[in-house]
Image (cartoon, helix red, strand yellow):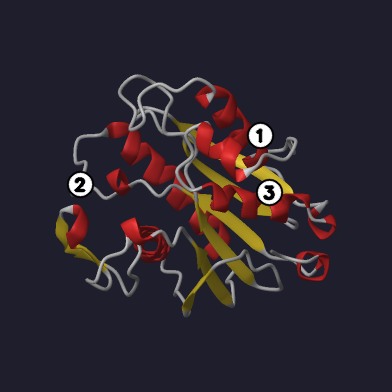
């Protein structure tokens, strides 16, 4: 959990999807995933252009997302795709996206830390890996769930300009969210007094796989285009 003192000191947050279909080798012909990646890279390039002095990744630490092959997507069917480090799927994806964004615009990446909470402070970029409901249509991972659409709206409101009423982890799980803790952490950040003047922008959203996959960029200083 962040506190108002740390929130008041600045920082950037970029929210990305944890979908492995973002890796071209795993979904080479899935245009919606390619578009999702492009939107994510655009947001990350914007954040990296501000030359963060510290990069923090916050992602699910559920054992089902763990691999013993450090820095590798081997466990998900892409042994040739490797990144600097990481043992959890969310960490691997976040670093892959950061590396892609860095390479395309020649922004050098500093050390990347893994953490359980959003870090807001001068020069800090936090990348949060979070997906919404996985029950948005009949072919979704959880099939079509009652309440999934409302849960996804809640997630997208939180990522964007609205601050919805708080939800419990149980309510989010019933709405099809696999990793509610990521959303509770995002809500704690967005609702903290020191983050009241944050500009929260939902950059992109797509539901083609029945999962709410989104990109968001939160910043106190960034001005609207």
Residue 148 % position (x, y):
51, 26
Q: Specify which label sits upstream in the sequence, 2 or 1.
A: 2
Q: Is residue 168 left or right of residue 206?
A: right
Residue 7, image x, y percentages: 77, 64
| Label 2 crowd (10 A; few <14 / some 14-19 / many >=20) | some
The residue located at (18%, 49%) in the rendering is 25
Q: Are marks 2 and 1 in contact (CB under 8 Å)?
A: no
How crowded is the residue under tag 1: few (<14 C-alpha within 10 Å), some, or many (20+)? some
Disc 3 on helix, strand or loop? helix
Mark 2, residue position = 26
| Earlier residue among tags 2 and 3 | 2
Residue ID for mark 3: 187
Q: Quadrant of the C terminus?
A: top right
Specify whether 90 is left or right of 146. left
Read off the residue under disc 1: 157
Cα–Cα gap, marks 3 and 1: 11 Å
Nearer the viewer's eye, disc 3 or disc 1? 3
């Amino acid at each position: 959990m962040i506190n108002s003192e740390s929130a008041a000191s600045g920082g950037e947050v970029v929210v990305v999807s944890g979908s492995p279909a973002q890796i071209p080798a795993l979904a080479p012909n899935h245009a919606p995933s390619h578009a999702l990646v492009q939107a994510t890279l655009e947001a990350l390039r914007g954040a990296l252009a501000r030359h963060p002095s510290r990069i923090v990744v916050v992602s699910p630490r559920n054992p089902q997302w763990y691999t013993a092959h450090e820095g590798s997507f081997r466990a998900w069917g892409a042994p040739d795709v490797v990144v600097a480090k990481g043992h959890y799927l969310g960490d691997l994806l976040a670093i892959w996206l950061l590396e892609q964004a860095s390479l395309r615009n020649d922004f050098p990446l500093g050390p990347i830390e893994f953490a359980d909470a959003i870090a807001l402070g001068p020069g800090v970029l936090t990348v949060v890996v979070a997906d919404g409901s996985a029950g948005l249509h009949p072919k979704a991972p959880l099939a079509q769930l009652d309440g999934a659409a409302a849960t996804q709206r809640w997630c997208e409101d939180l990522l964007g300009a609205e601050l919805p009423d708080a939800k419990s982890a149980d309510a989010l799980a019933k709405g099809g969210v696999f990793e509610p803790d990521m959303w509770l952490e995002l809500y704690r950040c967005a609702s903290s007094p020191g983050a009241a003047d944050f500009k929260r922008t939902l950059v992109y959203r797509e539901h083609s796989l029945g999962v709410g996959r989104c990109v968001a960029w939160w910043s106190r200083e960034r001005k609207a285009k």
